């Protein structure tokens, strides 16, 4: 039953991968990421030799200003990579804000060529690979120590997710493929691989997978209807103008829908896997469970999960939009104007559609899991009906 139900999804995923697979093309170096003179921007790493703070007008070569200007930072660095590796250069950071620099820190510089063909460098960002590496190692260690082999499999699933996003989803979007189709196919690939890899091949995992795929399809449909009815454009984001210049063929509204599907996937998967596990654990306490009673018991667990997940999802979106919310609070706009604006309304649609998908995934997955577990537990020669009646029938046979 599970194989027949999952086969159409697997076939559609494979066909979608074949049809949407992007060509091998280098999309880097677009117009929006080129230098002011139109040249290519390369990047190099360097180590800070000296840090000097001075007024921004002096550092940037400007004239006097009436308003006080914060200090700017001038860095003397030694290049570690690139054609000029080993040489020292000086770069002006501009208004450093809250950034702090110390001698020995590693920074990333952008390299361009000026009109005379000479290299020119500008500050891009700090290099944070060492602290991020330590944090990632601590995360992996804690996961493996607590979850053991399941945790190791989950980390492998993260690697698969990264490959799907980098090797398929992003290049396919840049190649002009349909963002909706790319999002759904990419999410299905992640689900098929990660679920079986992290939770093993079993009826429980297959039931959770089927519930997730059905809920994902519903979420995608609702997301399309919501974006069309609210007429969201996604043009309020600061990165969209650069994307429109670099990849004008990418649909911004479609990209909004694709991001909604991918963003909901993780929480949706969490709800369905937990609900399938709840059904199996409840059925283990009753060898001959009645489908109705098992469904109601599992739904009581699912309702608590829905309640906690919904506000978690909304708080996650609110946390990511906190700087925008602060900016809008200072603008003097009414709450109605803020909530119905394109940027905040987009986050509201994400939360509402994601919440509907999560809420619907619980009864869907519960129904699938109950159907599978009761069919598997119903042995030959056991009368249907209440477990107590089946037990009395077996004991009467023993007595006779």
Image (spheres, rainbow, N blue to C red):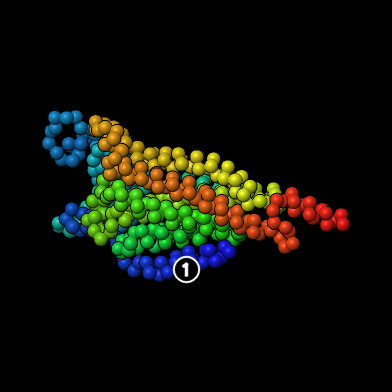
Task: Judge whether 33 appears above or below 71 on screen.
Answer: below
Tell me the residue that label 1 is attached to: 11
Q: Quadrant of the N terminus?
A: bottom right
Q: Nearer the viewer, residue 203 or 331?
A: 203
Q: Can residue 330 be seen? A: yes
| Other-residue count near label 1 (Cα within 10 Å), few / some / many at <14 / 14–19 / ≥20 | few
Residue 311 percent across, percent down from the top left: 45, 39
State the residue at coordinates (39%, 44%). 352
Q: Nearer the viewer, residue 305 or 72?
A: 305
Which residue in the rendered view is the most extreme toward the left?
63
State the residue at coordinates (24%, 43%). 92
Q: Can residue 324 be seen? A: no
Residue 360 percent across, percent down from the top left: 48, 49
Task: Judge whether 316 appears above or below 250 on screen.
Answer: above
Q: Quadrant of the C terminus?
A: bottom right
Q: Nearer the viewer, residue 322 or 288?
A: 288
In the image, is 319 to the left or to the right of 209?
left
SS assignment at label 1:
helix
Q: Could you tell me how many numbered marks the image carries? A: 1
State the residue at coordinates (27%, 41%). 341
Residue 148 percent across, percent down from the top left: 60, 51
State the residue at coordinates (32%, 45%). 346
In the image, is 269 to the left or to the right of 204?
left
Query: Dividing the picture into quarters, in which one does residue 70 lie?
Result: top left
Residue 11 percent across, percent down from the top left: 47, 68
């Amino acid at each position: 039953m599970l194989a027949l139900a999952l086969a159409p999804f697997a076939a559609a995923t494979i066909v979608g991968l074949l049809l949407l697979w992007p060509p091998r093309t280098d999309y880097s170096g677009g117009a929006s990421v080129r230098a002011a003179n139109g040249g290519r921007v390369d990047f190099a790493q360097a180590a800070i030799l000296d840090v000097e703070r001075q007024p921004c007008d002096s550092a940037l070569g400007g004239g006097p200003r009436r308003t006080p200007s914060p200090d700017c930072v001038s860095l003397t660095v030694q290049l570690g990579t690139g054609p000029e590796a080993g040489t020292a250069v000086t770069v002006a950071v501009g208004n450093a804000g809250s950034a702090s620099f110390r001698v020995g820190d590693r920074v990333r510089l952008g390299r361009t060529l000026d009109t005379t063909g000479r290299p020119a460098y500008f500050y891009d960002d700090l290099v944070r690979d060492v602290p991020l590496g330590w944090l990632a190692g601590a995360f992996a260690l804690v996961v493996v120590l607590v979850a053991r082999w399941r945790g190791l499999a989950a980390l492998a699933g993260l690697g698969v997710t990264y490959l799907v996003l980098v090797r398929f989803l992003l290049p396919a979007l840049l190649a002009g493929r349909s963002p909706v189709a790319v999002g759904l196919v990419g999410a299905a690939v992640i689900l098929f691989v990660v679920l079986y890899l992290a939770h093993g091949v079993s009826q429980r995992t297959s039931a959770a997978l089927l519930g997730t795929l059905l809920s994902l399809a519903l979420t995608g449909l609702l997301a399309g209807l919501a974006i069309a009815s609210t007429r969201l454009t996604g043009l309020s984001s600061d990165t969209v103008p650069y994307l429109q210049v670099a990849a004008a063929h990418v649909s911004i509204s479609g990209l909004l829908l694709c991001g909604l599907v991918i963003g909901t996937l993780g929480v949706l998967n969490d709800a369905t896997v937990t609900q399938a596990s709840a059904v199996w654990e409840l059925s283990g306490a009753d060898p001959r469970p009645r489908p109705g009673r098992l469904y109601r018991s599992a739904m009581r667990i699912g309702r608590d999960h829905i309640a906690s997940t919904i506000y978690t999802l909304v708080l996650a979106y609110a946390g990511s939009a906190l700087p925008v919310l602060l900016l809008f609070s200072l603008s003097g706009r009414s709450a109605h104007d803020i909530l119905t604006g394109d940027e905040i309304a987009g986050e509201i649609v994400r939360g509402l559609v994601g919440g509907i998908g999560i809420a619907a995934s619980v009864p869907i997955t519960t129904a699938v899991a109950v159907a599978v577990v009761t069919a598997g537990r119903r042995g030959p020669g056991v009368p249907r009906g209440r477990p107590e009646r089946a037990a009395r029938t077996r004991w009467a046979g023993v007595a006779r």
